[in-house]
Amino acid sequence: MKIASYEATILRVPEDDPLADMPEEAGRLRPIVILRLRTDSGIEGIGVTLYGGLMTRSLQAAIEDLCAAIVGEDPMRIERIVAKLRAGTGDSCGPGGIFTLALSAIDTALWDIKGKALDQPLWKLLGGHRDRVATYASGSLRRGLTDAQAQQAAQTLVRKGFKAMKTQMALPGDPTPAEEERRVRVVREAIGPDITLMCDINQRWRPEQAIDIGSRIEDVGLFWLEDVTAHDDYAGLARVTAALNTPIAGGEYVWGVVPFRHMIEARSVDIVMIDLARVGGPSQWMKVAGMAEAFNLPVVSHVMPEILLHMVAACPNGLTVEYMPWMLALYEETPTLEDGMLVLPKTPGLGLKFDEKAIGRFKA
């Protein structure tokens, strides 16, 4: 079996909030690139990548250039293909940026092909540690909401059966620590003590802010505080992690495998969050997960739950999957939610098939 052809397409996907109908900005679209990688035996693997922003057309071109270089390769030899692509760029286009984003789509499509060729779902190929995995609602409790809206959204998520959810602090403007504290307490009061609550800062605090505000809210019982300061301030993150009882999560902004070593060795975080596109695909995601396991740290996913549930379920230190649903509309069918858990698909590969009508609507 050989790689025969490819097709990379730019889409603009609505960033709706189907969980609680609280979009951050009504009508906002996110550009993504989807990949179809086809073999001479008729198997098609699919991949998705994002974060191109104004350079999304450059990202599409990068995927096409890299795919052209692997036509004729055996898709089952994934590490060989990744090494060839790295060598083909002269090792000058990584570990971050367009190369890694493009590699992620290709690597994902290759694993989809491998699963289909072997008639096995991806989570089993990667380790198969569990057949369902915990998940939490994300994307509804945005920092731009009023307290009343946040309370309404949180209660809606509880009614829908979610046992865990994520809110945000680092509120708009220049809020005082007391105002930041008020918001997270409003959400906790809305959902009660038994719902797991995480909070995302999106790198917007200085380490001393994170320590100050984090210490004020320790009685709220957050499952984690996420990305409290600049992702590559490993020493600053370590200060926060050491100072607070609340676990610190981070890693979604980290590119490639090696920077995770620096983050983990510095004891910067308690929970390692790995983004599929920025790390370079399932192959690299699992390497980081193994590294984290060696340091007795759990790993969690960032967006794209329909793909990342495979990786979180595959490894023994997989903790939970972020249920950010705005890309689910791309597919005919997506993994089932049952009692706060995602059920792993039994169909081969990713277990996903593009919805051609949706693809047509979202084409840029």
Image: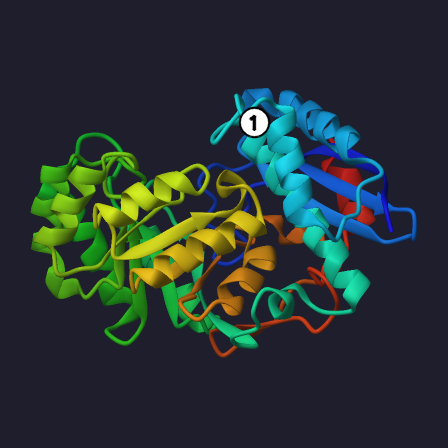
Give the side of residue 46 with respect to residue 194, left or right. Answer: right
Residue occupying the point 56% across, 69% down: 127
**Crowd tier of the residue under label 1, counting other residues whose Cα lies within 10 Å: few below 14, some 14–19, many 20 or above:** many
Q: Image quarter for residue 159?
A: bottom left
Give the side of residue 356 with respect to residue 17, left or right. Answer: right
Residue occupying the point 10% across, 46% down: 211
Q: Is residue 316 above or below residue 201?
A: below
Q: Nearer the viewer, residue 162 or 152?
A: 162
Q: Which colour scheme appears in the figure?
A: rainbow
Residue occupying the point 40% across, 67% down: 317
Q: Nearer the viewer, residue 175 or 303?
A: 303
x and y percentages locating residue 2 in the rendered image = 86, 46
Residue underneath mark 1:
98
x and y percentages locating residue 99 in the rendered image = 58, 29
Q: Nearer the viewer, residue 264 or 248?
A: 264
Residue flagged by tag 1: what amino acid is it?
Ile
Q: Residue furthest right?
A: 41
x and y percentages locating residue 215 in the rendered image = 8, 53
